[in-house]
Image: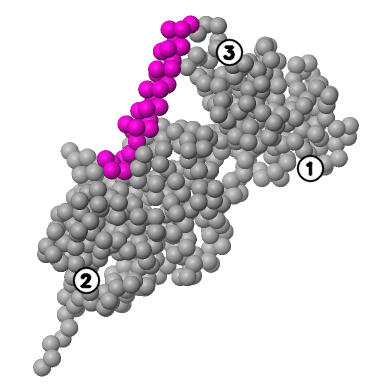
């Protein structure tokens, strides 16, 4: 165990001296559900990654105790290795100082520090140092993987294809040298492979649709990039104050924050239509989505040249498909200014800006005249309304008498049981991950429509057989998620994507699991279709 004179505080990441391994560790907290985790990353004396580990922490200790547990976990892990000459680094300077202090004054750390000291006293070539948080960012990202309960080892890698800490992020005080086994041919092949892989990831893989987002364009919507992480934390704070979500005046800001955070990731990973559709054998996801959208406008029976409303239009994927299919003039409304700019740009690229227009506004208080639309639709959008009668009432107001309205609603089905803890967990997971003030029962939809004055023409759950599973695309996308997540981590680490992008991407993956479980158990449907008609005005005698 080295004394304090031999452990200078690190302000830049240093290559370990020859024959030593560098071990960085960190702990992290997940405010969304009050859990914690730790990460450990090892590099050899050339700066090459060799192994890593991410583990959840079952209890919720203090921040300092959590950091101390990360140091102890790293020491225990590596103690069993042979030839273990290791330099340990943590960004918890206070904890490192306590390890080497003459007495342990901090009661909450006492037992953990004693364990750390015991291990250090048995290892001549172990030492613990402190370094800055910025230098320890890679380990912090590893710790965040524990959110998915990735307990255990990330497979050890010992290959010339692995890379050292990025030179752009860290200052190496000793010259970087390649392993002796890497000759010039191997080096050329390695560089070519990495360059080709990066080009494929960013340029070819790029977007989910031809005109979608590329990975290097990921942002926080209208949020300044330095505020993305804070807004993500603010989004989760809504769920710690459930009464706030029930207030109509709070919901627009809640939903707006959500779509600022997720719009770019949705476009990049899913496409321009932010909704589900039944899988159709022999059809691509894009074709199945288009058919599902075209059915909506076919149901309301409008004619070319008529004006119809898209209530909750997102970036306008359905709007463009419906305008092209029907020849109608489509006006969309969305609460999110960033989505307005994205939708208008897509409309222009598609050559549909003459037929499609987008307005930024709240569909609970729409800036349109009474009886100004010949038809209306909403596709998986009104679920964001705190009270369904408010948005249905506004749509009823702006429709001309005799016009039709169709909506695809997110609902709990007749199979949902509120007393079943697993059912409740799934539904609450969907609500948290999709900015919903509360999912409604399928049995409530028609009653609300009638309450505001509509005649219910037809009601059907489009997810039921013979329709093929709408969630199959989510299950098939798991490999793509991990591929994309690696890229998001890299882009956030090097500063291309704003801090918080990794957290948002993780949130959406976890939500996808809840959605899949909801579909597989049959307790949730995102496409409960209701077709309504605004009654004709009675003729004067």
Which residue is disc 3 drawn over?
177
Which one is nearer the viewer's eye here, 421 or 442?
442
Could you say whether the residue bearing mark 1 is in a helix, strand or loop? helix
Q: Position of residue 36 (x, y in %)?
A: 62, 42
Vertical position of residue 198 compared to residue 347: above or below: above
Q: Secondary structure at mark 3?
A: loop
Q: Is residue 374 above or below residue 496?
A: below
Q: Which percent across, then down, holds residue 92? A: 72, 36
Compared to residue 341, the image places residue 209 above or below, namely above
Give the residue number, with chain letter if any, for mark 2.
373
- Evaluate whether residue 153 shows in this view: no
Q: Residue at x 44, y 60 (%)?
A: 255
In the rendered structure, which segment of residues is drawn in magenta? 183-212
Looking at the rendered structure, the number of numbered marks drawn on it comes to 3
- Give coordinates of residue 238: x percent, y percent: 53, 60
Cα distance, mark 2 to mark 1? 66 Å
**Residue 537 location in percent, x, y?**
17, 83
Looking at the image, is mark 2 or mark 1 earlier in the sequence?
A: 1
| First of labels 2, 3 by sequence position | 3
Residue at the location (46% across, 49% down)?
Answer: 220
Alpha carbons under labels 1 and 3: distance apart: 43 Å
Magenta segment's dominant SS is helix
Q: Is residue 63 left or right of residue 383?
A: right
């Amino acid at each position: 165990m080295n004394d304090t004179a031999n452990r200078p505080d690190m302000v830049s990441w240093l290559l370990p001296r020859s024959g030593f391994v560098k071990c960085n560790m960190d702990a992290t907290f997940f405010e969304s559900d009050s859990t914690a985790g730790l990460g450990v990353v090892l590099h050899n004396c050339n700066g090459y990654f060799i192994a890593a580990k991410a583990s959840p922490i079952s209890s919720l200790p203090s921040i300092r105790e959590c950091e101390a547990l990360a140091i102890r976990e790293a020491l225990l892990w590596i103690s069993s290795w042979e030839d273990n000459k290791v330099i340990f680094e943590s960004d918890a300077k206070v904890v490192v100082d306590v390890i080497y202090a003459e007495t342990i004054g901090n009661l909450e750390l006492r037992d953990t520090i004693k364990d750390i000291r015991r291990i250090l006293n048995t290892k001549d070539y172990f030492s613990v140092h402190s370094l800055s948080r910025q230098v320890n960012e890679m380990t912090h990202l590893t710790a965040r993987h524990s959110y998915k309960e990735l307990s255990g080892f990330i497979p050890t890698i010992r290959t010339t294809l692995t890379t050292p800490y990025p030179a752009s992020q860290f200052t190496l005080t000793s010259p970087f040298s390649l392993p002796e086994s890497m000759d010039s041919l191997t080096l050329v092949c390695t560089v070519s492979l990495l360059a080709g892989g990066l080009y494929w990831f960013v340029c070819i893989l790029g977007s989910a649709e031809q005109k979608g987002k590329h990975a290097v364009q990921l942002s926080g919507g209208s949020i300044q990039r330095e505020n993305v992480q804070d807004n993500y934390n603010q989004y989760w704070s809504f769920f710690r104050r459930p009464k706030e979500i029930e207030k109509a005046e709070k919901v627009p800001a809640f939903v707006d924050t959500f779509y600022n955070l997720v719009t770019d990731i949705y476009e990049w990973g899913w496409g321009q239509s932010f909704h589900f559709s039944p899988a159709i054998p022999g059809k691509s996801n894009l074709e199945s989505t288009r058919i599902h959208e075209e059915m909506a406008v076919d149901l309301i029976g409008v004619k070319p040249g008529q004006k119809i409303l898209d209530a909750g239009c997102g970036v306008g994927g359905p709007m463009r498909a419906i305008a092209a299919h029907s020849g109608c003039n489509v006006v969309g409304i969305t609460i999110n200014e960033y989505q307005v700019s994205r939708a208008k740009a897509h409309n222009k690229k598609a050559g549909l800006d003459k037929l499609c227009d987008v307005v930024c506004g709240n569909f609970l208080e729409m800036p349109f005249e009474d009886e100004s639309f010949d038809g209306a639709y909403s596709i998986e959008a009104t679920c964001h309304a705190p009270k369904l009668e408010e948005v249905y009432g506004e749509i009823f107001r702006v429709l001309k008498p005799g016009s039709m309205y169709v909506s695809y609603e997110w609902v709990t089905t007749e199979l949902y049981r509120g007393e079943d803890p697993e059912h409740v967990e799934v539904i609450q997971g969907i609500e948290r991950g999709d900015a919903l003030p509360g999912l409604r029962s399928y049995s409530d939809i028609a009653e609300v429509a009638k309450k505001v004055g509509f005649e219910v023409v037809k009601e059907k759950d489009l997810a039921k057989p013979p329709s093929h599973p709408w969630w199959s695309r989510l299950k098939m996308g798991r490999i793509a998620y991990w591929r994309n997540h690696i890229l998001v981590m890299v882009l956030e680490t090097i500063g291309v994507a704003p801090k918080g992008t990794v957290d948002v991407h993780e949130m959406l993956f976890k939500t996808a699991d809840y959605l899949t479980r909801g579909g597989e158990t049959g307790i949730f449907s995102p496409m409960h279709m209701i077709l309504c008609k605004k009654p004709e005005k009675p003729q004067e005698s």
